[in-house]
Amino acid sequence: MKINGKQLDSPGGDIIVFPRIDEDIILKVGCVLDYEPFNTMIPLPKAPQILLRGQTQYSPNVEDPEYNKALDKYSALKTHWMVLKSLEANEDLEWETVDMTDPETWGNYIQELETGGFCDNHVAKIINTVAAVNGLNEDMMEAAKKRFLAMQLAQEQQSSLQAAAVNTSPGDVAKDSD
């Protein structure tokens, strides 16, 4: 796909810079384009079926406590997976206790970040940036819109200046300076 003649071949992303006395830590946050590996590994839980009084067909029992517990676990695993996949944009980032083939280890990244010197607010910043990059964040969309409109205005002004230069003859300039 192309937009304005440019091939769209890489997803959006962001960077986070954490200032340190000796050297800043820069984390790239990539966009996750394919959730199929997660969905294959961790299927969405299904609510148990229940036959309600007066009904002839079974309905999902979304109030079931075990189902809701499984749904909470599914959501947490999906968030952990998304964070880890987003941080794969950092080729040199190595996890010591996270194994992408073992979902039970995915949440370990939080402890590893904290052990590595990231405070709670920094961990929250990482998770929030991952969420923003992988969703339609209103602030990011508004900033992109402002950049687009500024670029449009600059192009219009450039076109107006070029048109004025073409329509101005050397004699007009001499008359104006009198």
Image: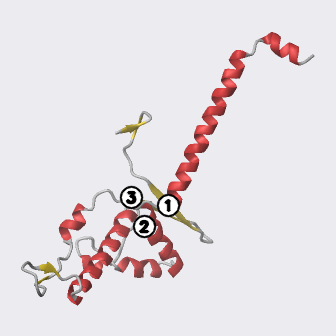
Q: Which residue type does callout 1 highlight?
A: Glu
Q: Position of residue 101 (x, y in %)?
A: 23, 71
What is the quadrant of residue 100 in the picture?
Answer: bottom left
Q: Amino acid at mark 3?
A: Cys
Is residue 144 visible to us here? yes
Residue at numbered disc 2: 131
Is 164 situated above or below 90?
Answer: above
Residue located beneath label 1 in the image? 138
Q: Residue at x 23, y 89 (%)?
A: 65
Q: Which residue is mark 3?
A: 31
In the current view of this chain or complex, which residue is farthest to the top? 171
Numbered disc 3: secondary structure? loop
Of helix, strand and loop, which one carries label 2? helix
Does 52 appear above or below 98?
below
- Which SS class for mark 1? helix
Q: Quadrant of residue 84?
A: bottom left
Question: Residue 34, image x and y in percent?
Answer: 28, 58
Indicate left or right for 1 with 62 as reference. right
Q: CA distance from mark 2 to mark 1?
A: 12 Å
Q: Tell me, for residue 49, which label it has, or none.
A: none
